[in-house]
Amino acid sequence: MAAIRAAIDAGYAVELDLQQISGGVAVFHDFDLARMTGRNGDLRQMTPAALKRFRLSGTGETIPLLEEVLALVRGRVPLMLEIKNPGRPGAFENLIAMQLAGYRGDLALVSFNPFSLGWLRRHAPRFPRGQTSCRFADSGLPVWPKFLRRNFLLNAVSRPDFLLYDLAALPYWAASLRRALGAKLIAYTVRSDADAAKARALADNFIFEKIRP
């Protein structure tokens, strides 16, 4: 939450990852708790109350819930919410849409999973959607699903309003072609001024950390 407050103070949009837990939606990147909390555990098995027992990277900060983030931001800056759902879409996406129903502020929903975005297109079309992609080198996906996702060939399912691609993989023909045809492209993740210069040349915007553009 301290990082989100800092982004609000600087006037930056906030990019967050959403994961389903037992009885709620957590804002957290990893599926396992170890890297950020020093304690082993499967995030998805936690309850909202259990999350409050973990501290992030030696700070007093805890893992927030989506509803807590929405109450903090209150539309003051845009939100980009990444849905981390590697499985079948439906229940988790519906839970997110319900929590966002009364929110007043600019936001977009993005995902690596084109079927999550396809579900949102049908059931929550008011939210802009972004299709995220990369090389999928360490994804564990079979060859054909990896090929289809890497090259945006499942966009017929997700019908995204914009695209996101790993900066380290750019330039890449599939992203460049889509951009040449009019798609807006966001590069991720920029961590230096050199990264920012590369992203400005190859994309329309970028997600960043550790720098203040």
Image (cartoon, rainbow, N blue to C red):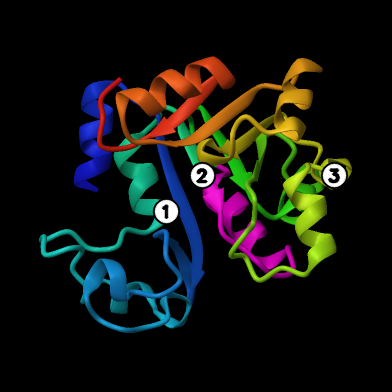
Q: Residue at x 81, y 61 (%)?
A: 145
Which residue was labeled with disc 2? 81
Q: Nearer the viewer, residue 133 or 18?
A: 133
Which of the numbered marks, if any, corresponds to residue 153? 3
Residue type for callout 2: Leu
Cα distance between the residues tagged 2 and 3: 22 Å
Q: Nearer the viewer, residue 132 or 136?
A: 136
The reply to whether the magenta stretch includes residue 201 is no
For the question of whether residue 77 can be seen, the reply is: no
Q: As drawn, is 104 to the left or to the right of 60?
A: right
Image quadrant holding the C terminus, namely top left
Residue type for callout 1: Leu
The answer to whether the residues at label 2 and label 1 have Cβ atoms under 8 Å apart is: yes
Which of the two discs, 2 and 3, labels the residue nearer the N terminus?
Answer: 2
Q: As drawn, is 173 to the left or to the right of 19?
A: right
Which residue was labeled with disc 1? 66
Q: Residue at x 58, y 40 (%)?
A: 169
Q: Residue at x 49, y 17 (%)?
A: 200
Cα distance between the residues tagged 1 and 3: 31 Å
Label tally: 3
* Badge 2: residue crowd in 10 Å (few <14, some 14–19, many ≥20): many
Q: Residue at x 63, y 26 (%)?
A: 185
Specify the segment rendered in magenta: 81-101
Residue type for callout 3: Leu
* Mark 1, secondary structure of its residue: helix
Q: Disc 2 or disc 3, which is closer to the eye?
A: 3
Q: Where in the figure is residue 166, as x and y percent of width and height?
A: 55, 41
